Amino acid sequence: EKRTLYCESCDSLNCRDCQLRDKHRSHKYRSSHEVAPEIKLTLMKNVSDIKLKKNGLEESRGVLSAKLAEVNVKENALLGQLREIKDYLVSKIENKYKELEVEVTKTTREKRKVLEGRKGNLDRMFWQADNCLAFVTHVVNGTSDEKMLLTKKMMARQMKRLRRANHAVNL
């Protein structure tokens, strides 16, 4: 039997037979065509929130990309200066040069690793937000109310998780 009744107590779509069972007998029901517009409105509000989150993610990704480029430029500049000092005082500071080179490389590698890790997280959140938006938009605009109501919890849970995600650069 087609599921046409929305159980507000269980937050699920049911058929007439399910409504008469002991498990659902005392629950409050509404017709799925009455509930669908409310659910659509809620989902569309969540889509707006996720779009804002996606914009923030995109901006944060740009900041991290710029910072990575800056770290690379700074590393190259520092290594160039160190080479000049080495050439000037080769006989006296060969050991010190090697220590400084290792320290600069280690520091920039650690900084790069942190920035790349954060950028990787932001990339993942960005693509999750993008896929979530595409899926919800498809469900809201291109499928039956039944399918939308059946996937409502999953979509709401995913959008809630994405809204809570931290998109700060944290430099």
Image (cartoon, rainbow, N blue to C red):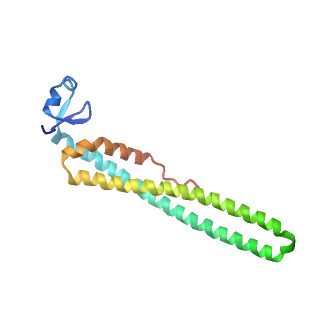
Q: Residue at x 35, y 55 (%)?
A: 131
Question: Residue 121 appears at what percent x and percent y?
Answer: 49, 54
Apparent side of residue 94 relative to residue 73 in the rendered image (left or right): right
* Residue 52 visible to the viewer: no
Question: Quick one: quadrant of the N terminus?
Answer: top left
Q: Residue at x 33, y 54 (%)?
A: 133
Q: Residue at x 22, y 46 (%)?
A: 147
Up-down: is 46 above or below 3? below
Q: Residue at x 20, y 51 (%)?
A: 143
Which residue is more in the foreground, 29 or 114? 114
Up-down: is 18 above or below 78? above
* Residue 138 visible to the viewer: yes
Question: Residue 118 appears at what percent x and percent y?
Answer: 53, 55
Q: Which residue is farthest right? A: 92
Apparent side of residue 137 relative to residue 118 in the rendered image (left or right): left
Apparent side of residue 158 relative to residue 32 in the rendered image (left or right): right
Question: Residue 112 appears at what percent x and percent y?
Answer: 60, 60
